[in-house]
Amino acid sequence: MGGWAIAVHGGAGVDPDLPLERQEQAKKLLTRCLNLGASALRADLAAIDVAELVVRELENDPFFNSGRGSALNENGRVEMEASIMDGSGRRCGAVSGLSTVKNPISLARLVMDKSPHSYLAFSGAESFARQQGVELVDNDYFITEENVGMLKMAKEANTILFDYRVPLGMGSPIQMMNGLPISVYAPETVGCVVVDSRGRCAAATSTGGLMNKMTGRIGDSPLIGAGTYACDLCGVSCTGEGEAIIRGTLAREVGAVMEYKGLGLEEAVDFVIKNRLDEGKAGLIAVSNKGEVACGFNCCGMFRGSATEDGFMEVGIWDQ
């Protein structure tokens, strides 16, 4: 085994005019999460525990689009989703349509560990959360003044906003998704992939989805094999145009080409980004059971960071 490794992301497709101050804030948060995960790995926590721990940290910070600070749907409410997968035995748990659960990733973990199912959604997921005694909050906890303002802008423009913190008209061209117009392409889903010192891989992904999304919309983040996947070879978390990631079963494809084509991790990530997204825009982070770490994206930047047992640590936004 090559030792432990960890990678985090905060979304792919960053506006090229993103203010420097916001770039530095993103890097600071990613560094904090990497340090948290690295400390846990040094203490010999299992990969699945570290993945949950780091994504919880990201959910608790309103900077990215998950947990507190999640995007608002067309009715001005938060509907969050998350998934987690343990490569050991390919166990998984996922949730969607959450409006009161403070940490969706931990409820996804409970679905995996404490229920006979892999996926619970909306009222069923909320009921399960109450049964399990997880921390609940009012929906208002997740709603920020900034989000309310951006939802208003989205409605006035009759569009869906991906990066709802970047004002319209900052120079980014209008793009399309499923034939409909969207604005600045910079979804800020969060994710973490981990391989521990025993070579066990895990992945976790959490998001608030799209600003001004239709009520009930489910993206790639809670879908095992699309936004999240882990097996004995690797762990993968995706971000970007959810509909394209779903169509390409992007996360599973990384493991599949490693298994069936014999590609190494970096080769597999590169192959999938270049050949499985069609015209979609997205990115992903991945680790292998050999302690390798890799990322890839085909859009303008991805909030990301990685660290390994040999002391390597890096955070970045733009070109790889």
Image (spheres, helix red, strand yellow):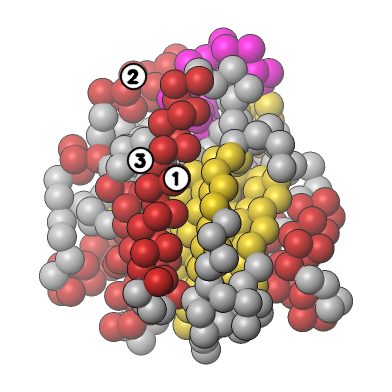
- In the rendered structure, find residue 70 and report the number of the disc placed on it: 3
User: Which residue corresponds to mark 2?
Assistant: 149
- Residue at 33% over, 27% down: 147
Horizontally, residue 9 falls left or right of residue 66, namely: right
Mark 2 and mark 3: Cα distance apart in space: 13 Å
Q: Residue 48: image x %, image y %?
A: 42, 74
Q: Amino acid at mark 3?
A: Ser
Helix, strand or loop at disc 2? helix
* Front in this rendered view, residue 161 or 46: 46
x, y percent for residue 131: 15, 74
Q: Nearer the viewer, mark 1 or mark 2?
A: 1
In the rendered image, which quarter contains the N terminus? bottom right
Q: Quadrant of residue 50?
A: bottom left
**Magenta-colored stretch includes residue 161:** yes
Above or below, 12 against 200 in this view is above
Question: Pointer 1: what residue?
Answer: 30
Depth check, front residue: 255 or 92 = 255
In this rendering, the answer to whether 97 lies above or below 48 is above
